[in-house]
Image (spheres, rainbow, N blue to C red):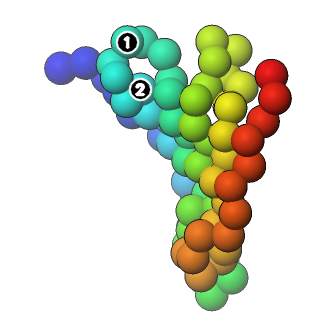
Amino acid sequence: GVEDTWSYPDAAGLLLKVEIDTDRDGTVDKRDIYAASPDAPDGRVLAVVELGLDKAGQPSRRLYYRPDGAFDRAETLRR
């Protein structure tokens, strides 16, 4: 199989981010960034999704989520 998903821990060994090559062309297209859960310090919740990453890893869009998992807002970035 082709590797298409990479997970990275923080300094404590807990999930920090997941990078995904959605079209399997060898370039990361999506990055999920996690934060500490307000209810459980050892738990993680999705905080930000970065989409449209360029070759340098810079996103064209970010989706932000609240600690309860609800969608908060979207941001379009200039490159």
Name the residue at the bottom extreme: 39
Residue found 58% across the figure and 29% down from its top: 52
Q: Which residue occupies 44% across, 33% down? A: 20
Q: What residue is disc 2 on?
A: 21
Please report contact status of discs 2 and 1: CB closer than 8 Å, yes or no. yes
SS at mark 2 in the image: loop
- Tell me, for residue 25, which label it has, or none: 1
Give the residue furthest to the left.
1
The number of discs equals 2
Kind of residue at disc 2: Asp
Residue drawn 68% across the image and 32% down it: 60
For the residues labelled 2 and 1, the Cα–Cα distance comes to 7 Å
Q: Nearer the viewer, residue 9 or 5?
A: 5
On the question of residue 42 being in view, the answer is: no
The residue under label 1 is which amino acid type? Asp
Taking 16 as reference, is 26 left or right?
A: left
- Quadrant of residue 1 in the image? top left
Quadrant that contains the C terminus: top right
Relative horizontal placement of residue 25, taking residue 59 as reference (left or right): left
1 vs 55, left or right, is: left
